[in-house]
Image: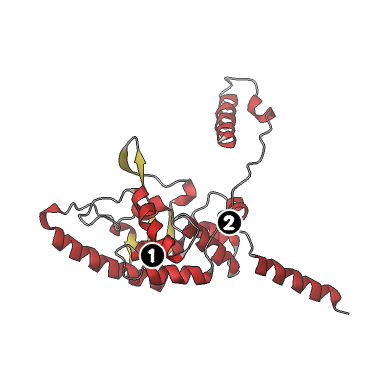
Amino acid sequence: MVQYLHAVLRNALQHAVREELVQRNVAKLVQVQTPRYRVGRGLSVTEARKLLTEVKDNRLHAAYVLALYLGLRRGELLGLHWSDVDLDSGSLEIRTALQRVNGELTLTAPKTRRSERPVPLPAVCVNVLRDHRQRQELERREAGDRWKDSGLIFTTRVGTPIEPRNLNRHFYPIRERLGLPVRFHDLRHTCVTLLLGLGVPPHIVRDIVGHSALDVTMNIYAHAEMTEKREALNRLGSLLSEE
């Protein structure tokens, strides 16, 4: 927060310098300590597979698949409209996010400028979205006159937006059954770490998940498991011991 406020003030004063309203930008004289990011815990491949198996028959199965495969934020998931998706070409456009603002559920712009992004849909995501659309159509018929057409992909059983905190609550009993000490947001973390573990270039991972900068991808998410660290050091040991 301190870093953010300093950046806003520095930019405002720099604009004032250009407009010749002030002589110099004194905010540039202030040194702001680099923040220390908390590294979350992602799921292993085995844990991620267990989760996908557990939610396979759940009405929100597609939400878990998109969170794990695409690293979408909670608000981005719940703000997705069917008009944002082209299942024939296999593409998705992140345009809005659903958040509670001043007590009201509101569609807002995504978190950062880079968060507004096109994302290719792998076949597994296309398939689960097709199934989800059929499930939603069945719920629409069952709800009858009670259905509120919002155009959203993920809704309640009567078509209204899902309260973001309720998505967390939906995840709680699932993680308890599976013994997973993670938050729903850590599914996004899982996507990033697994992609990096596969050797995907960091700038590609950044663009997929919509991080504001590359250092966010690397500093917050790119942690290596002990087995990976051991493997790397063993390879170095083998290299240095060669004659």
Residue 91, numbered circle: 1
The location of residue 41, given as percent across then percent down, is 55, 58
Residue 165, numbered circle: none
- In the displayed structure, 182 sits above or below 127; it is above
How many marks can you see? Answer: 2
Estimate the spatial distance between the alpha carbons at disc 2 and disc 1, rounded to whole Å. Answer: 25 Å
State which quadrant residue 27 falls in. Answer: top right
- In the displayed structure, 51 sits above or below 76; it is below
Q: Residue at x 75, y 73 (%)?
A: 234
Position of 235 with respect to 112 (left or right) is: right
The location of residue 121, given as percent across then percent down, is 41, 67
Amino acid of disc 2: Tyr
Figure colour scheme: secondary structure
Position of 75 with respect to 43 (left or right) is: left
The residue at which mark 2 appears reads as: 221
Position of 163 with respect to 44 (left or right) is: left
Q: Residue at x 58, y 65 (%)?
A: 196
